[in-house]
Amino acid sequence: MVFASVIVLPRIRAILKSKGRSKVGRTVLLTGRPGVGKTTLIRAVLAELPGTGGGFFTQEVRSQGMRLGFDIVTLAGDRLPLARRDVLGLPRVGRYGVYVENMVRLAVPAIHSALLASDYVIIDEIGKMELLAPTFREAVLEAVSSPSPVLGTVMQGTDPWVDALKRQRVVRVLTVTEDNRSELQEVVLRILCA
């Protein structure tokens, strides 16, 4: 498995500026209850967007109908564990031990690579587990303040850092429900392609 190297954030800003991409982009963050279809909606939107996307998804890991944890899966196909049920010796979110170092090794570089080489940045998800990595928070802020359109999912509950992110001028938060999923695909496409 090949991992992108962590790039210093000021260097990303300088590269984007040199490419004429210095204005601020648009960010759409989808929220809603677990299992409502936020990731499915992102995948559907991504399939319709012109150009390329980069970043990562958080994917459930199941065995025999039981959820064992979550993996980080980049759009380039790299994969590492994010969290596993009942693992000891790691920071915890509920019953899951969180592999914070894997956020730094895979998710953060995936965001940086998307900023440099893709038309869209995918961040699925911004939640309690992911927020345990301070460099992830920095990468999210870098993406949101960049000229690249960002599409992601965000926790529905309250958290001071997440609440401040949701209030940023360039961020549009849309709540996904079973009733509005199909209409939201067109709404998200219009916002990102504006």
Image: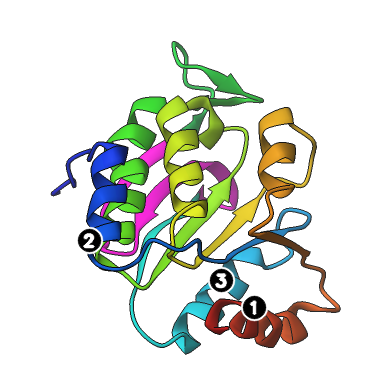
Q: Are marks 1 and 3 in contact (CB under 8 Å)?
A: no
Please tell me whether mark 2 or mark 1 is closer to you in this view. 2
Instruction: Provide the secondary structure element on which disc 3 rests.
Output: helix
The structure's colour scheme is rainbow
Give how far across and how far down residue 65 sits, in percent. Answer: 59, 53
As for residue 71 lying within the magenta part, the answer is: yes
The range drawn in magenta is 61-82
Residue at the image point whose x is 56% and y is 59% from the top: 152
Distance from disc 3 to disc 2, alpha carbons, whole Å, reads 30 Å
Residue at numbered disc 1: 188
Distance from disc 2 to disc 1, alpha carbons, whole Å, reads 28 Å
Q: Three-letter amino acid code at disc 2? A: Ser
Instruction: Provide the secondary structure element on which disc 2 rests.
Output: helix
Q: Residues within 10 Å of mark 2 (few under 14, many from 20)?
A: few
Residue at numbered disc 2: 18
Which one is earlier in the sequence, the residue at label 2 or at label 1?
Answer: 2
Which one is earlier in the sequence, the residue at label 1 or at label 3?
Answer: 3
Residue 175: quarter of image: bottom right
Q: Three-letter amino acid code at disc 3? A: Ile
On the question of residue 17 being in view, the answer is yes
